[in-house]
Image: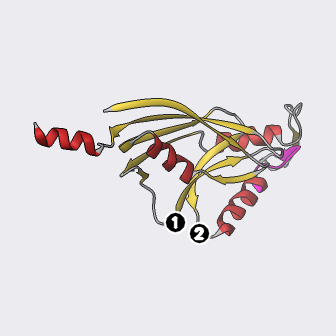
């Protein structure tokens, strides 16, 4: 059993989803892991990680629009009978800043994923997404921790058989 700690960097293009599934599978492959667990942690408070459908782009569009409806920009209405409007107190970095923090709190900043044969074990229509909640392009860093079995190369297999 071996483990590594590393980081993966992504450039987002404003609010939306980036499918990082292939990047994760390549990372596993390049580090010669066969099976194990990959732990991902976003090192940011205004983006998140999610697993969702990768076949119909309307799923991601609907997710984004739903999240925008429950976490509006600038202010929100209380759920009380009086439905008071409350403005965000944290707005120094723009109208998208506090809503981004709320969206991150409602979603995931960490994922644990099993992999086998150097590939993530996902469903047929699943992908892993980095979900950017800010308007502008951002550089995002994910901490990666893999615990698992390394792939045996042909040389090691031959030596084991000869002994």
122 relative to 151, above or below: below
- In which quadrant will I find the C terminus? top left
Left or right: residue 26 compared with residue 139: left
For residue 55, which numbered disc appears in the image?
Answer: 2
Instruction: List x then y, in percent, for residue 29.
Output: 44, 46
- In which quadrant will I find the N terminus? top left
Q: Quadrant of residue 98?
A: top right
Instruction: List x then y, in percent, for residue 133.
Output: 75, 46
Q: Earlier in the sequence, mark 1 or mark 2?
A: 2
154 relative to 122, above or below: above
Left or right: residue 134 compared with residue 125: right
Instruction: List x then y, in percent, for residue 106.
Output: 65, 44
For residue 98, which numbered disc appears in the image?
Answer: none
Instruction: List x then y, in percent, for residue 130.
Output: 64, 47
- Residue placed most toward the observer, 121 or 102: 121
Q: Residue at x 52, y 61 (%)?
A: 126
Left or right: residue 84 compared with residue 45: right
Q: Is residue 56 magenta?
A: no
- Residue placed most toward the observer, 113 or 5: 5
Q: How crowded is the residue under tag 1: few (<14 C-alpha within 10 Å), some, or many (20+)?
A: few
Q: Residue furthest left?
A: 163
Q: Which residue is mark 1?
A: 125
Q: Residue at x 89, y 43 (%)?
A: 74
Left or right: residue 36 compared with residue 14: left
- Which secondary structure lies at badge 1? loop
Q: Quadrant of residue 151?
A: top left
- Which secondary structure lies at badge 2? loop
Which range of residues does the magenta coloring cover? 69-77
Q: Are marks 1 and 2 in contact (CB under 8 Å)?
A: yes
120 relative to 141, above or below: below
């Amino acid at each position: 059993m071996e483990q590594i700690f590393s980081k993966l960097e992504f450039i987002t293009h404003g609010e939306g989803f980036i499918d990082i599934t292939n990047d994760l599978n390549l990372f596993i492959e390049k580090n010669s892991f066969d099976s194990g667990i990959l732990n991902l942690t976003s090192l940011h408070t205004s983006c998140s990680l999610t697993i969702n459908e990768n076949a119909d782009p309307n799923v991601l569009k609907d997710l984004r629009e739903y999240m925008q409806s429950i976490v509006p920009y600038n202010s929100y209405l209380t759920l009380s009978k009086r439905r008071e409007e409350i403005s965000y107190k944290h707005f120094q970095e723009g109208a998208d800043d506090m809503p981004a923090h709320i969206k991150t709190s409602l979603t995931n900043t960490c994922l644990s994923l099993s992999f086998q044969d150097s590939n993530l074990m996902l469903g047929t229509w699943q992908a892993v997404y980095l979900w950017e909640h800010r308007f502008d392009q951002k550089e995002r860093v994910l901490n990666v921790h893999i615990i698992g079995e390394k792939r045996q190369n042909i040389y090691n297999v031959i030596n084991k058989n000869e002994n």
